[in-house]
Image (cartoon, rainbow, N blue to C red):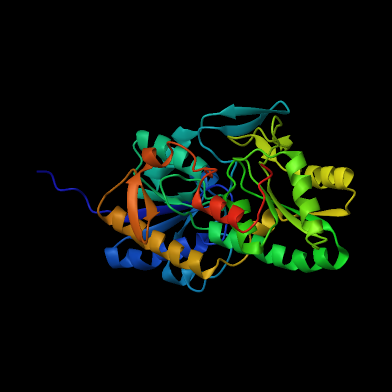
Amino acid sequence: MAVKSKVRRIGIITGGGDCPGLNAVIRGVTKPAQDYGMSVFGILDGFEGLVEGRARELKNEDVSGILARGGTILGSSNKGDPFHWPINKDGKIEIVDKSEAALKNYKAWNLDAIIAIGGDGTMHICKKLSDMGMNMIGVPKTIDNDLDATDLTFGHDSAVFVVSEALDRLHTTASSHHRVIVVEVMGRYAGWIALNGGIAGGADIILIPEIPYSWEKVYDKIFKRELMGKRFSLVCVSEGAKPLGGEMVVKGHDMKRHDPVRLGGIGEVVAAKIEENTGRETRVTVLGHLQRGGSPTPFDRILSTKFGAFAIELADARKFGRMVALKGNEIKNVRIEEAILKQKLVKPDTQAVRAAKAVGISFGE
């Protein structure tokens, strides 16, 4: 039986949008790597660095003190898909395949494997690179929490914390001025941030993509609160939410991204409709990138550290083509192709939705 070669050189890459906990994973990979006799090569600016050949060695001193730091010390990009690479040709954006350049750099750096930290898009890229012969290990990251093969992705808890704190603060000003305040949050096609953030922050109405809402039901909730002596309301709306028979509000399109649709603007639409049809003074707050920035929560620091350390274990065992995943309270691993089978969306009858309804939160149904 042939003896499998020892893994000596690991690349690490942070793909897609940034979020709290990325640095904690980088630290969780780099610190234990030396115990396995591995060196760590940090690939810069996501998959752009893999295609363009930009990387640097990571030592223990490089990751010292970064556990609580937001963002990523390696840089990231959500426009660097090697299989969907934008170039400017005669003033127009043209999409080309640069995966061979990525493979060339992988070989030139003498990498035995790459640990790729990212969401759904990153995991799809990992599967394609695996098919080309690269040894890939995935670590699930996204504030949207929409990867089906893991109970939670790191970054989600930190985003929910930002939403809940914002709602806490807006509660006092909404109450003081007897206003309706609409808070628009991220999440794209999944409503997890709005759902969990809305519950934690005491929202009165939560609007998510998975439960199309009725405008009349939204207005009725505001009127019913007034009948109870509550002259204000908080509405937490996911950027991908849509009314019955309606469409998502699209802010624009960016052809450099694999999914070119840029969502945004639903908060303004909801606020304008509420003010017009209830006569109540309404304001809107768009949290935007506040949800992706800043220091990770203790939960995300712990989860990220576990993910990073377990990814090194997988590399040492040569278990490639796998993604680390939280299952219950334990870190397990799943096949990357299993991780990308479908998005994890909010089921209308999930326990969190039932609990929200039980305490009086309306979903506009």
- The residue nearer to you, when weighing 46 against 277, is 277
232 on left or right of 246: right
- The residue nearer to you, when weighing 147 against 21, is 147
- Farthest residue in the front direction? 227
Look at the picture and state if 316 lies above or below 277.
Answer: below
- Farthest residue in the left direction? 1
**x and y, in percent, of residue 2 in the image:** 12, 44
Look at the picture and state if 127 lies above or below 170.
Answer: above
Residue at x-position 44% and y-position 44%? 148
- The residue nearer to you, when weighing 252 against 212, is 212
**x and y, in percent, of residue 198 in the image:** 64, 57
The reply to whether residue 112 is in sight is no
- The residue nearer to you, when weighing 83 against 198, is 198
The reply to whether residue 146 is in sight is yes
Look at the picture and state if 21 lies above or below 322.
Answer: below
Residue at x-position 49% and y-position 57%? 154
Residue at x-position 39% and y-position 49%? 114
**x and y, in percent, of residue 129 in the image:** 41, 37
Q: Quadrant of the C terminus?
A: top right
Q: How many labels does the image show?
A: 0
Residue at x-position 46% and y-position 54%? 152
**x and y, in percent, of residue 176 in the image:** 85, 68
